[in-house]
């Protein structure tokens, strides 16, 4: 009896038969998909803009991000706004 069990365990064909008996059904595929869904190579298409203002480096990126967020950049004080409205030539 022990020899039969040992021969089955050591036989590579029998090991493959045991491994193949566990069929991978739809539930297994869905689980693996949920586990590995962030590992795809095309994650560059899912780019999200930077959330921390300090991390936005280029001025052009800051201008576009400020426009998306709905505030004015670069920020101007009252003196700059008045100079723009009333030129000094007059």
Image (cartoon, rainbow, N blue to C red):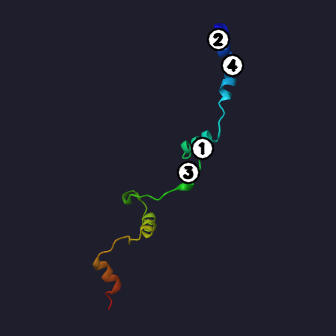
Q: Which residue is mark 3?
A: 43
Pointer 2 and pointer 3: residues touching (CB < 8 Å)? no
- Give the residue at x 38% y 58%: 52
Residue farthest along the left direction in this orientation: 79
The N terminus: image quadrant: top right
Depth order, front residue of 40/84: 40
* 79 on left or right of 38: left
- Residue 48 horizontal/vertical position (percent): 49, 57
Q: Where on the picture, by quarter, is residue 26?
A: top right
Classify 10 Å Cα crowding around label 4: few (below 14), some (14-19), many (20 and above). Answer: few
Q: Which residue is mark 2?
A: 6
- Give the residue at x 38% y 60%: 53
- Residue 78 horizontal/vertical position (percent): 28, 78
Q: Nearer the viewer, mark 4 or mark 2?
A: 2
Q: Which residue is mark 1?
A: 30
- Residue 20 horizontal/vertical position (percent): 68, 28
């Amino acid at each position: 009896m022990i020899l039969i069990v040992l021969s089955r365990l050591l036989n590579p064909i029998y090991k493959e038969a045991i491994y193949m008996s566990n069929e991978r059904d739809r539930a297994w595929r869905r689980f693996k998909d949920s586990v590995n869904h962030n590992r795809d190579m095309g994650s560059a298409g899912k780019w999200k803009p930077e959330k921390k203002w300090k991390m936005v480096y280029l001025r052009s990126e800051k201008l576009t991000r400020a426009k998306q967020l709905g505030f004015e950049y670069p920020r101007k004080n009252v003196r700059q706004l008045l100079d723009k409205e009333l030129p000094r030539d007059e």
